[in-house]
Amino acid sequence: MKIVYLYSSLAIMGGVERVLVDKMNYLVNHGYEVYIITADQGQHPIPYKLDERVLFYDLQIRFHSQYRFSGWQRLIEGRKLNRLYYLRLKEKLEKICPNIIVCTTSQAVRGLLRIKGNIPLVVESHVNFSHPDSWHHQIRTLYNNYRIGKAYAVVTLTQGDAKNWIRVSRNVLVIPNIVHLNDTGCYSNCTNKRAIFVGRLVEQKGIPDLIKVWRIVNQRYPDWQLDVFGNGEMDSLPEIKLFVHPPTEAIMEEYINSSMLLMTSVYEPFGLVLPEAMSCGLPVVAFDCPYGPADIIKHEFNGFLVPKRDINLYANYVCALMESPGLRKKLGAEGIRMAQQYQANQIMPHWQNLFVSLISKDTF
């Protein structure tokens, strides 16, 4: 069976990029012929190890070049690049003749529906159906969503998001992400006075709320520190023990040397870092945002789920963990067990079943 994945580029050390590489590697190891077609890879190296049997094609569109212009000229250049993209993509698909196309970029779906012919299209949603943003971006997102609904299937990461996609698609499935779990045999003993945050330093990740929480916590427990791993800008805060580091490939070691993970996202399609950290024995604390954390965290069992972005309650849960090494170890031990459900051999059979159903003559 030939599977084609479409994505913009595998150029950054991000969650979606890692998940896609892991899925493609799994599939080629189970007899599939797998292709990845990107638009803007250029000369950027792939930050994760992609199996050499996965066939990689970059269409060299350079969508970013339109931003050298402004106003109408940018719009014109953007349309030219879109036409070039679909022309090259159509040629490539005709040569490959895939059985299934998996698309993870919502903006590409409209044109893809025109050129794909009878090839079943699966849209893999790595964003929520709707999320806080500017009004004009929300309108564009809703327009894209209804186009996505015309695909053969929409795969979401959480039950909460699936309830929204059902409004536009007749075939919605929930398949969580596969997660890189701790396989070192070593786990946190939850004794280091160190919390960890892992994620991009952007508005979506709730960085201002993270700082507010840590100011409260640091006043009560000044001997604890927070280490933040992520790309982006963050103001220097010398009065509290908060340290910012670039992303690292040795993140499992950082988890193991910590005693809890904090997540403050405003919305989170899944939340890879939660089961990652849990697999290292860390209790986790997160806001109950749409929609990922609620599917992963069982409140007071493997961590804490904070409603209504209550900063003080969040800080209280963090302090409760700091006060009790026993509680940290208890929740962390449960996290190790629950994280195992996100192993590739647990998740990928669901994708294989979907692929088989899509090429069955009786399915549609």
Image: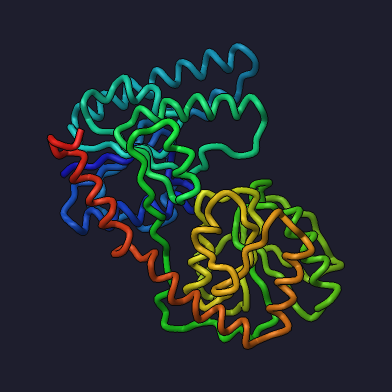
Q: Most extreme residue toward the left, as rendered?
A: 361
Tell me residue 158's x, y (percent): 46, 51
Tell me residue 161's x, y (percent): 49, 45
On the image, which quarter does residue 30 sit in? bottom left
- Return the residue nearer the eye: 363 or 322: 363
Tell me residue 48's x, y (percent): 41, 57
On the image, which quarter does residue 346 sit in? bottom left
Tell me the quadrant of the picture where the N terminus can be found.
Answer: top left
- Return the residue nearer the eye: 267 or 43: 267
Query: Tell me, what colour scheme is on the image?
Result: rainbow
Q: Which residue is pictured at 29% across the width and 33% down the height?
A: 152
- Return the residue nearer the eye: 278 or 91: 278
Query: How many discs appear?
Result: 0
On the image, which quarter does residue 355 sit in? top left
Q: Is residue 297 above or below residue 70?
A: below
Confirm whether residue 57 shows in the render: no
Q: Which residue is pictured at 77% across the width and 66% down the height?
A: 214
Q: Is residue 351 above or below residue 100?
A: below
Tell me residue 211's x, y (percent): 77, 60
**Left-right relation of 360 to 170:** left
Q: Is residue 211 above or below residue 137?
A: below
Q: In this view, does 213 lie above or below 127?
A: below
Confirm whether residue 326 shows in the render: yes
Tell me the quadrant of the picture where the C terminus can be found.
Answer: top left
Q: Which residue is pictured at 17% across the width and 32% down the height?
A: 97
